[in-house]
Image (spheres, rainbow, N blue to C red):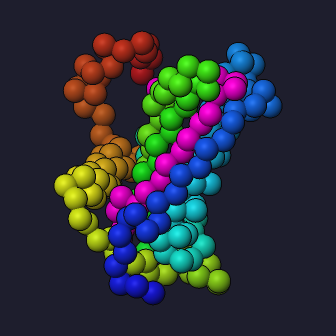
């Protein structure tokens, strides 16, 4: 295993024509189908970087920004943004293109945390990432901050440690909720 690799060594791009069989009841491409493609490309990118089988540990922030139409080309791009000891954060970008007009839309960007596994299912070390650009440093640092924010959210609202305060109750007053405590 190489101790460090460039992100470009494992970048993956796939393009697929959206068919009627991929659509939901409103005639748009089903979000679940797009998520499946995103998971596949994240797996391919992480596996290429680590040279091991990888599993999805988590997905951070899935926002569907624009609908995708039947007949459009969808392009997914994946790149390693962060490497830990056995895990990687893979950035996935989804764009659609109207074949007739050439108009492109950004449809989604998400971050998949993937973990490298050996043949027995144990976590294995992954190569580190060589950062050559400001964009690479930004992506790596952003991944670190997202991890810290996720830990803080999890710890702050643990069932065993949550203490309802007047601040929580006041905050609820601005939302569509009725309290019956």
Q: Which residue is pictured at 43% across the width and 57% down the height?
A: 79
Q: What is the span of residues highlighted in magenta in the rendered image?
A: 65-84
Say above or below: 165 vs 15.
above
Q: Which residue is pictured at 53% across the width and 70% down the height?
A: 48
- Where residue 1 sits, quadrant-wise, is bottom left
Q: Nearer the viewer, residue 6 or 39?
A: 6
Q: Nearer the viewer, residue 156 or 81?
A: 81
Q: Which residue is pictured at 37% across the width and 75% down the height?
A: 5
Q: Nearer the viewer, residue 45 or 110?
A: 45
Say above or below: 94 vs 12.
above
- Where residue 15 sits, quadrant-wise, is top right
Q: How far across and down, in percent of the image, does residue 6 sit?
A: 35, 70
- Where residue 151 sits, quadrant-wise, is bottom left
Residue 148 appearing in the image: no
**Horizontally, is 52 left or right of 26 in the view?**
left
Q: Quadrant of the C terminus?
A: top left
Residue 156 appearing in the image: yes
Q: How far across and down, in percent of the image, does residue 65 sit?
A: 47, 26
Q: Is residue 173 magenta?
A: no
């Amino acid at each position: 295993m190489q101790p460090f690799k460039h992100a470009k060594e494992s970048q993956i791009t796939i393009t697929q024509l959206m068919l009627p069989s991929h659509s939901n009841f409103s005639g748009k491409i089903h979000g679940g189908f797009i998520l499946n493609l995103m998971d596949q490309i994240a797996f391919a990118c992480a596996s290429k970087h680590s040279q091991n089988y990888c599993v999805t540990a988590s997905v951070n922030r899935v926002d569907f920004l624009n609908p995708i139409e039947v007949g459009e080309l969808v392009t997914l791009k994946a790149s390693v943004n962060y490497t830990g000891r056995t895990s990687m954060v893979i950035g996935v970008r989804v764009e659609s293109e109207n074949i007739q007009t050439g108009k492109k839309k950004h449809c989604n960007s998400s971050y998949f945390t993937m973990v490298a596994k050996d043949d027995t299912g144990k976590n294995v070390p992954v190569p580190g990432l060589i950062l050559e650009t400001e964009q690479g440093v930004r992506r790596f640092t952003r991944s670190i901050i997202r991890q810290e924010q996720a830990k803080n959210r999890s710890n702050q609202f643990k069932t065993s440690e949550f203490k309802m305060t007047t601040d929580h109750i006041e905050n609820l007053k601005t939302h569509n909720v009725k309290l019956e405590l």
